[in-house]
Image (cartoon, rainbow, N blue to C red):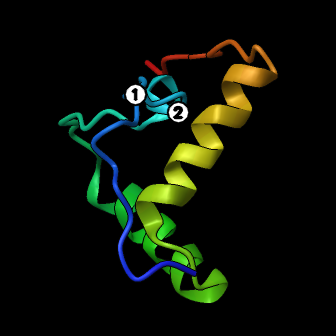
Amino acid sequence: MKREYDFSKMKSRKNPYVSKLKKPVTIRLSEDVIAYFKEMAEASGMPYQSLINLYLRDCVQGRRKVDIQWQL
């Protein structure tokens, strides 16, 4: 292994994973929803934002439609 490498001759290229990066958004969620995911996150050892993302991704992949029935 060399002590030093010369990177000046390398060509740059675009990051192939840039399209898969997460985009930060602001979203308003009910306290009970956040508490639910935080509880699940603690049990699984995964950040609650990641759990919410996984759940929403599952909805997208399953092409789930929202079934809202308003109670009068």
Residue at image position (44%, 74%) is 38
Q: What element carries label 2?
A: loop
Estimate the x, y position of residue 5 in percent, counting from the top left: 38, 64
Amino acid beneath label 2? Tyr
Q: What SS does tag 1 mark?
A: loop
Under mark 1, the amino acid is: Lys
| Residue at x 58% of width, y 81% of height | 1
Circle count: 2
User: Percent x, y for residue 4?
Assistant: 35, 74
Q: In this view, does 42 lie above or below 67?
A: below
Q: Which of marks 2 and 1 is nearer the N terminus?
A: 1
- Give the x, y percent position of residue 60: 68, 21
Q: Residue furthest right?
A: 62
Q: Is residue 18 above or below residue 31?
A: above
Horizontal side of 50 relative to 62 (left or right) equals: left
Query: 2 or 43, which is in the foreground?
Result: 2
**What residue is pinned by disc 2?**
17
Which residue has dot 1 on it? 11
Q: Using the rendered view, name the quadrant where residue 45 is placed.
A: bottom right
Q: Are marks 2 and 1 in contact (CB under 8 Å)?
A: no
Q: How far apart are marks 2 and 1 (CA)?
A: 18 Å
In the rendering, at what x and y percent does residue 52 appear?
Answer: 51, 50
Location of residue 13 with respect to 43 vertically, above or below? above
Disc 1 packing (10 Å; few <14; some 14–19; many ≥20): few
